[in-house]
Image: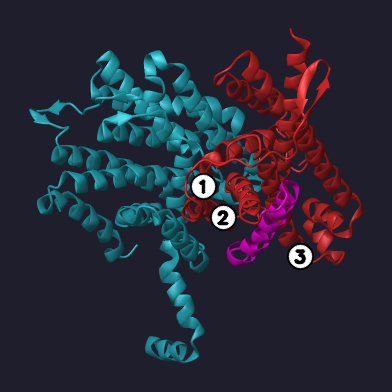
Chain colours: A cyan, B red
Amino acid sequence: MTRAKSLAPLAILGLLFLIPAFTQNPYYLYLICNFFIWAVVAVSLVVNIRTGIFNFASAAFMGIGAYTTAILVVKVGVSFWLTLLIGPLVGAVVAVLIGIPMLRLKGMYFVLVTALFCQIFILTIVSLSEQTGGWFGIAGIYAPTLFGIDLSEKVPFYYLVLVFMSLSFIILYRIWNSYLGKIYAHMGENEALAQSVGVPVTLYKVQSFAVASFFTSLAGCFLAASTSYIEPGMFSFFASIKVWLHAVLGGVTSVFGPILGTGVALGLTEWLRGFLLISPIILGVFVIIVIIFLPRGFISLPEKILYLIERIPRLKEFISRRKS
Amino acid sequence: MDQAYFVQLLINAVMLGLIYTLTALGFTLIFGISRVVNFAHGEIYMVGAFVAYSLVSYGHLPVVLALLLAAVVVGVLGVVLEFLIFRPIRPKQVGTIDELPNVIVSVALIYIIPTAVVLIAGTRERTLPHLITGSVTLGGAIISNERLLIMAVALAIFVGLLLFIWRHRDGRAMVAISQDTEAALLQGVSHQRIISLSFGLGFGLAAIAGALLAPIYFIDVNMGPPVLLKTVIVVILGGIGSIPGTLLGGLLVGFIDVFGQAYLGGSLPTLVAFALVILIMLIRPRGLLGHD
């Protein structure tokens, strides 16, 4: 990786840290926190996609994290920090439990079954309405104080989310580029081949699924604290579909793609909020046009531009002359 | 248990089951041939109901004609959509991540279609006038002729589809493509033609299913998502790519819905359906009659 490439993400991270210096508007900060949370979910999903796991249960795992935090903090009085540990762990355990039977299923079936799992999750929450508030949800989820700073205040909360979500992203990034990440990629490309050379595919698939669910649940915990109110409808499989939109729009071939995709999608949704009635149409048409032009997502824009340039003969000659 | 009540439940279950079957067949058809998971299938069902409604209220067509015409119109819409947005992103190779754009496009349709319908038609509740009036007495129960007619039409469409698949050249081409695409192409089957056909049929089936139930239930822009959910359950239970399996799955879900609602009520029927899905998943992943 060239110097510039490795510095760019750090620069961006630095910028993110400085944002509260420019604006303290609670709504903007809330939007950016939302972006961090959904971006991490999208990145986790892309790690799964790379492994060949077409996971449509992201929303359910966000729900697991969110409800764990909500119930423990509001109803049981457990420390928020502890729930940040318990929530993702519950998510990972559930992922292992349902992963082992589900991951045996072939492509399309797995898609349908994970989508169904979101609905199962919602129904479960609703049936346990004693503990979970049923359809009405749980309110009053707040982050605690740390060293005297009330973390549920907008600016401190922003930093809280930024720290945890960027840590999550860094871990996922490291996994992606590690030896394990390469194994995942090989499995995703040709599972039979990987298995034939001795890769324990089931083990790694469950592991990948559990890791993604861990971070997705963690993001869910912060979602609960960010909106301070959660209800089952937030975690339907249509929410999972949103995550897929973010991931594929940005590009599933890199960890940065989903971040880009989430940013564009959320930004666009926000910008279109004024055009209330037709905004879904504009969004939908935008997505379709982008995907037709860039099937591999925004992240493939540079290579697409280069590809187009190559097709222009005079430009090609010009470039090759400049190269020599 | 009151026999009359039981008969009514039975008729409803079969009727609903057949409708679910038709919808699921549309879904499975599109997936089997074009490898597209049509997440917007529920929305197409809804559009079918709305188009039928418009044909009746504004076109003043007789209801039964409106139903069939609605299916044709929406079927054509399917072919057009395939041409406009699914064809440009068709992957060169199946089973790769290049198939993902299809998912995104059908997801985009979930946003676009209901919004467009609201813009065109507004959000007030509507219902279709009855297909026919009158009722018969069956086994001590009073059954409306309308429900029987719906059952008959749904069954006729199902049988028609079967005949098409078995006898008609294009129908057999569809089976061939879904079983072994390369071999089918070698036999001279036009891939594009079959793909367009699958979209047209798939959309048309969803539309007529929606239109058929319209006289009984309210037509509402949000009736798409629950239909998608039911379709997914039917397909998992019955097995993708198996028509008899889809019929079995559809009837099963229909029975669970109707009898579950009658005896258990609330969201318990859905829970039962889910439990069944989990069971199938564990014991027989490819569905009751699936082959793939």
- Quote the CA–CA distance across marks 2 and 1: 8 Å
Labels 3, 2: front one: 3
Q: Is residue B64 magenta?
A: yes
Q: Chain of mark 2?
A: B
Mark 3 surroundings: few (<14), some (14-19) or many (≥20) residues within 10 A: few
Query: According to the image, label 3 marks what residue?
Result: B193
Q: Position of residue B167 (x, y in %)?
A: 92, 53
| Residue B90, picture quadrant | bottom right
Mark 1 surroundings: few (<14), some (14-19) or many (≥20) residues within 10 A: many
Mark 2 surroundings: few (<14), some (14-19) or many (≥20) residues within 10 A: many
Q: Is residue A260 magenta?
A: no
The amino acid marked with disc number 3 is Arg
Query: According to the image, label 1 marks what residue?
Result: A49
Give the left or right position of residue A156, taking residue A75 as reference. Answer: left
Query: According to the image, label 2 marks what residue?
Result: B97
Taken as a whole, is the magenta stretch helix, strand or loop? helix
Residues flagged by tags 3 and 2 on a common chain = yes
- Please say if A300 is above or below A95: below
Q: Chain of mark 3?
A: B
Quadrant where the N terminus of chain A lies?
bottom left
Q: Chain of mark 1?
A: A
Depth check, front residue: A25 or A152? A25
The amino acid marked with disc number 1 is Ile
Q: Which span is picked out in magenta?
A: B60-89
Q: Which residue appears at 42% of the width and 48% of the height? A: A176
- Quote the CA–CA distance across marks 1 and 3: 31 Å
- Tell me whether the residue at label 2 lies in contact with that at label 1, contact meaning CB atoms closer than 8 angstroms: yes
Secondary structure at badge 3 equals helix
Q: Position of residue A317 (x, y in %)?
A: 45, 91
Q: Which residue appears at 78% of the width and 35% of the height? A: B151
The amino acid marked with disc number 2 is Ile
